[in-house]
Image (cartoon, rainbow, N blue to C red):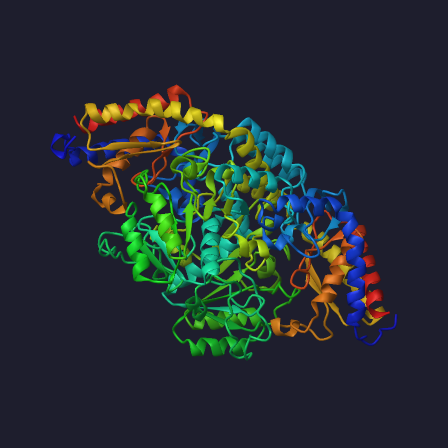
Amino acid sequence: MSAAEHASIDMELVDRLTKEETAALDAKHARSLSYRSEAARHLPGGVSSSWQMWPPHPIYVSRGAGSHVWDIDDNDYIDYHNGYGVMVMGHAHPKIVEAVQRRVALGTHFAQPTEDALIVASNLAERTGLPYWRFGNSGTEATLDVCRIMRAATGRQLLLKIEGSYHGHHDALMVSVFPTREDAGPRDHPNPVPQTAGMIPGAAESVVNVPFNDADAAERAFAEHPGLIAGMIVEPVMTNCGVVLPDPGYLERLKGICAANGAMFAYDEVKTGFTVAWGGAIEAFGVRPDLIAYAKALGAGLPCGAIGGTEEAMSLVISGELDQVGTFNGNPLTMAAAKVNLTEVLTRDAYGRLDEVNAILDGCNDVIERYRLPASMKLQGAKGSIDWHTEPIHEYRDLWDIDDRVPQLAWLWQLNRGVFKSPGSKWESWTTSIVMSDQDAQRYVDNFESLAAAITA
Amino acid sequence: MAVRQPTEIDLERVDALIAQEEAALEPKHAASIAYRATAQRTVAGGVASSWQDSPPHAIYADHGQGSRLWDIDGNEYVDFHLGYGAMVMGHAHPKIVEAVQKQAARGTHFAQPTKDLHAVGENLVDRFKLPLWRFCNSGTEATLEAARLMRANTGRDIIIKIEGTYHGHHDALMFSVAPDPDLIGPREHPVTLPQAEGIPDAFAKLVRVVPFNDLEEVRRALAEHEGNVAGMIVEPAMMNCGVIFPEPGYLQGIKDLMHAAGAYLAYDEVKTGTTLAYGGAAEVFGVTPDILCLAKAIGGGLPCGAIGATQELYQPVVDGVYDMAGTYNGNPLTMAASRVALTEVMTPDVYDHLNGIHKVLQDGCTAAIERTGLPAYVTGVGAKGSVIYSETPVREYRDSVGIDERITYLAWLVQQNRGVFKSPWSKQETWTTAITHSEEDARKYVANFEELATMLTQ
């Protein structure tokens, strides 16, 4: 479809629909709204993480089972949010519930090693082909450790990252996460833009950004900073502007460029691990990095993180020269849940269900065609997105052309029709789960079609 | 009882005793030692955190109940380690077990707010007298936020920290944690030394290190960086060289100095919060900071963290111009455990019990010290205590550098061989008691200590 063939979206109509949908949503969330005013007395914004403040108002969740969640107003949703991509195994999976209930009675925390850590690590080694593992408590801690190792192992200080990628909340990489057009600088030399006030002064200047899917840009960055870049960290599927797949050969070239420059090559698979395939992006795209950061789906809904690496990459940690530490690292309750999750729930076979769900979600493509929407869809395992853009998003800067109002309406539209997508919908899309039914998938497509009809009317 | 004059400890004898105790320990841990050989094929070093790899070998835990811990060899210990101070409520407390079992069946994670948040928040307000709270997943994440909040709210660069304190694993504060005495420089201008490789050099210039318990040095630091100090972070009772109390007036003094300079005071109460007293060190020493970081004991044994602060500091977060975010922040399973741990288990009355246990430990160990002339003394309050192997009081990190680590290592081995699990790396980490400890448990610690004191002074 060329741009001329796309239906035009009347933004005044979008604004009017958004107003209607917001009003409809407010009416359903009387308890969430009143609870928030109480919670806000002791919790800034009434929530525990700023991402939970998404407009029009935070939605307080009561419980989940399988592919469904219920909020405190007892609205029932099919969950495509899945806790920002964590719950690909579905909520309260009986095997996970059993494992947690059993372990909690035996003690949850000793700060001593326990046997389950080995089983989890062995499974991770099998999935990735990376032999050595350590644990942490979040994606933030995992990528922090990855940066520390890359710098310690090379004695270099600069890190190379992708413009528009988020790698957690610590200072080393919280740079150019969502830079505005005004701040971002030229594409061939993006400015390092701190994502928040209060970061360590100089942290941003320790990072070089390059666009995704442009290996030449990465090569140039190494040439411009000879001998100074410790390593490159990349989400093999870029996930904060929809689901952006790597171009064929891109990851392989990055790995080669890093190796040629004596730098390390790391994946942030916090989002793609255990979701895009059984073996994550390594299986899906066939390129193995030196280091990898995991979190999210690993722990079956308990706070978790893991870093894996080659023997060479992990040698400083193995030898004890570099401490990789944390009181809760390898927490026995988390490990008990992760063990069952990885070995009994998210098995190789389970991923077939995600493909079946995607075959139904593919119906959104038909809707895009029939309504000539200026949009495209991407699907990879449990991850999917609709880019409200005439061309598929290929790198972060493509996102600037998207009018936020359309994906925000899409989010409201689904929410009012029984589908809970991740908020922040311009850059966060959906996560399916292995327990979704055909009807769960069809509901998404049906809602998408009614939205398409409404905005092209 | 006669108080003997301090006896010089013979370090050659200590070495011989260490060899003897290590030899006794090894056969008890055949399963741990064998398991480690397997584990290290995929788990780096065979452990999930480098601190779990304490000498002489990693000990794999199997299960815990109340004040007891069992390793995979079936050895039973009275647990004074308590997961580096997290399990002050005891292992597998029935109320926490029930709460976790119930919540697991209702779903563990939504990344949406849930109703337990507010109950936990209210309890923390009651304990620590700070109005607003957010949650995270570790002490590291909590102090990271504290450093950032201070810088964001002032627009300034420098953070003052205490020499010899640990505030987590991130880049902002991982300096001069256990600095090499040969490299630390003059006391009035300590060298800011990175604790690990892999921290950019430039970050060291942003951390001004001062000794604990010295207001004059804080004044000096503020004067030297006039107008550029964002704040100071301090463990109100310093915890990594034994339990070091703040001297009277010190905490109020640094708070006043910070405020006069337009800067903030942050407490790292990751170790002391809900362990020293119901309201942590802030209650014990009577000074409320601007920011307070928690982790460890507040989560009922699940990964957790929390940051409390004043309305002023949190305003940018309330307004949404400053994100404090994390996928697992306020995790429903953690919050369910935390709610019960804080509101039903660690109630105000249990602190009397902890102080009673502390008294048994303090009196018993002090009597042994006096009887044998061991150059040592006992400190602590509530669930936290330590034996400090120094004739003169340790007021700051530099006072502790002369303590020979072999003595504290031997102390750990002696307890370990006699059914008491203390925190490893014992020079820096001491004991934590739980509300499930009995006086008999405490007397066991004392009896072992008496034996050690005799061994060291014979």
Tell me: A281 left or right of B287: left
Q: Residue B351 or A362: which is nearer the viewer?
A: A362
**Looking at the image, which residue sits at the far right?**
B1
**Residue A24 appearing in the image:** yes
* Image coordinates for residue B289, horizontal then vertical, percent: 51, 62
Quarter of the picture containing the C terminus of chain A is top left
* Image coordinates for residue B406, horizontal then vertical, percent: 72, 66
**Residue B132 appearing in the image:** no
* Image coordinates for residue A414, horizontal then vertical, percent: 32, 29
The relative height of residue A178 versus residue B13 in the rendered view (above or below) is above
Tell me: B419 left or right of B97: right
* Image coordinates for residue B3, horizontal then vertical, percent: 84, 73
The relative height of residue B222 versus residue A387 in the rendered view (above or below) is below
The relative height of residue A355 versus residue A218 in the rendered view (above or below) is above
**Looking at the image, which residue sits at the far left?**
A4
Count numbered badges in the picture. 0
The residue positioned 31% from the left and 53% from the top of the image is: A218
